[in-house]
Amino acid sequence: MATNSSPATSSHVDVIGRLGAHVRSRELPSGDELTTFTVIVDRPAREQRGQAKVDAIACTTTNRKIRDRVQRLEPGTQVEVAGVLRRRFWRGGANAGQVGSTTEVLVRRLRSVGAGT
């Protein structure tokens, strides 16, 4: 028997780190412009295993103001992004039946942090 007492669900992500080296934009078939970039986050020493000392967090936006802001920043700039976690699927590759996916932060807010801000 179903009840309405299920807990509410939410997806909210805050990431503070360094802007990665590449900011890329491309037009989607819908006409929207998708901008992708990474935020590099240092792992705490107790969580570092093997060679992995950082995590590169994939971020995307279709928001023009955020796109313009992130494109003006230098790689390595300390940034804070806020958004929601999304999993995106697509078909493509050499085999049209091939399906790919990625989990990324859909950015709703971006600001540079640290010295001079």
Image: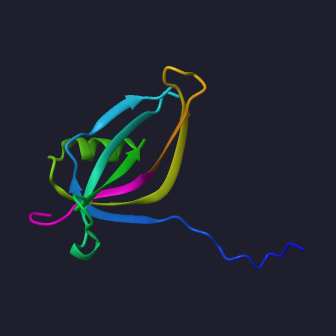
**Who's the residue at 24% across and 62% down the image?**
50
Front residue of this view, candidates 44 and 8: 44
**Who's the residue at 32% across and 42% down the image?**
67
Q: Position of residue 115 (x, y in %)?
A: 9, 65
Front residue of this view, candidates 46 and 41: 46
Q: Which residues are magenta?
A: 104-117
Q: Position of 54 compared to 31: left or right?
A: left
Instruction: Give the quadrant of residue 47.
Output: bottom left
**Who's the residue at 14% across and 46% down the image?**
74
Q: Position of 114 compared to 50: left or right?
A: left
Q: Main secondary structure of the magenta part?
A: strand
Quarter of the C terminus within the rendering: bottom left
**Who's the residue at 90% across and 74% down the image?**
1
Extreme residue toward the left, this view? 116
- Tell me, yes or no, whether the highlighted magenta stretch contains residue 89: no
Is 70 situated above or below 99?
below
